[in-house]
Amino acid sequence: MDNRDFVRNSKLSRTKMKKMSIVFVVPIIVMFFCTSCVRTATTTSELEDLQDIVYKRAEPSTNSKAVNLLKTVFDPNYSGTQHAVGKVVFCGPFIWKKITDDQAVDSSTGIPLIMVVPTTRGNLQLRGRGIRLESDVWKIEAYIRTVLAKDGTFVIRKLNNKELRLYWAMIPYDIEEPIFILDSKNHKILVDFVDGKIMHVDDYQKASL
């Protein structure tokens, strides 16, 4: 078994991850990832050369639908009832720190997520949050809209190599489109979709392991 097969076999299926988000009863979820997920970045910018990452493309129509939803819901003047986030949202460690620093939600909100990521310096513990209470989920969405509005404008784009590797190192499932970065002056907000809604968010502005 080569490294690529080992990485694939170590990851949860997206179906299993969805089941985790539905059950969501464990007070602390600890995620361990294989050491072969932490690898030296390639020099090329082509996604096809990131052979240790499992990246599944979606149909163009599926991506377009997600992009239109992002444009609508994160418009600074939006006041509708449609939401981009799902019933459960996982906040990665980088955006969770910013959310709590800005006091957008109470630091005790949701369920703690402790991510244990192997690095060349040893295991790194990162703390995120799982949110499932509807009112708190909407606060996360509102926070993203607010910070993007403060920056004036944002671009919706796909992840670059560095961002793909960072996300891959911290998740127990394959990367599947639709997945985008909302790129503004002070933020690079990752949004990962499941069943047409955002399941995972993070902010990769100045983020690194």
Image: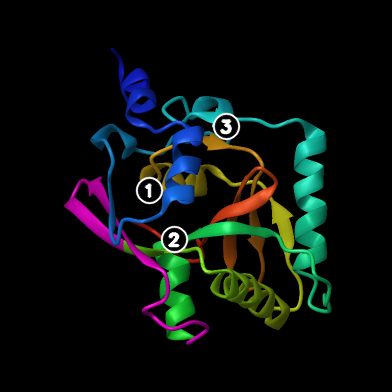
Which numbered disc, 2 or 3, marks the residue that appears first in the sequence? 3
- Residue 77, percent across and down? 83, 79
The CA span between labels 1 and 2 is 9 Å
Which kind of residue does numbered mark 3 sit on? Leu
- Residue 47, numbered circle: 3
On the image, numbered disc 2 is attached to which residue?
A: 92
- The residue lying furthest to the left in this view is 122
- Which of discs 1 and 3 lies nearer the camera? The answer is 1
- Is 26 located above or below residue 9 in the figure? below
**Residue corresponding to mark 1:** 170
Q: Is residue 64 left or right of residue 176?
A: right
Q: Quadrant of the C terminus?
A: bottom left
Answer few, some or many: residues within 10 Å of disc 3's Cα (few below 14, many 20 plus, some between 14 and 19): some
Name the outermost residue toward the top.
Answer: 1
How far, Cα to Cα, is label 2 from label 3? 23 Å
x then y, percent, for residue 24: 41, 54
Q: Secondary structure at mark 3?
A: helix
- For the point 43% across and 49% down, the residue is 23
- Is residue 178 shown above or below 150? above
Q: Which residues are magenta?
A: 103-126
For the point 47% across and 50% down, the residue is 21
Quarter of the rendering containing residue 85: bottom right
Mark 1 or mark 2: name the one nearer the start of the chain.
Answer: 2
C-beta proximity under 8 Å, tags 1 and 2 = yes
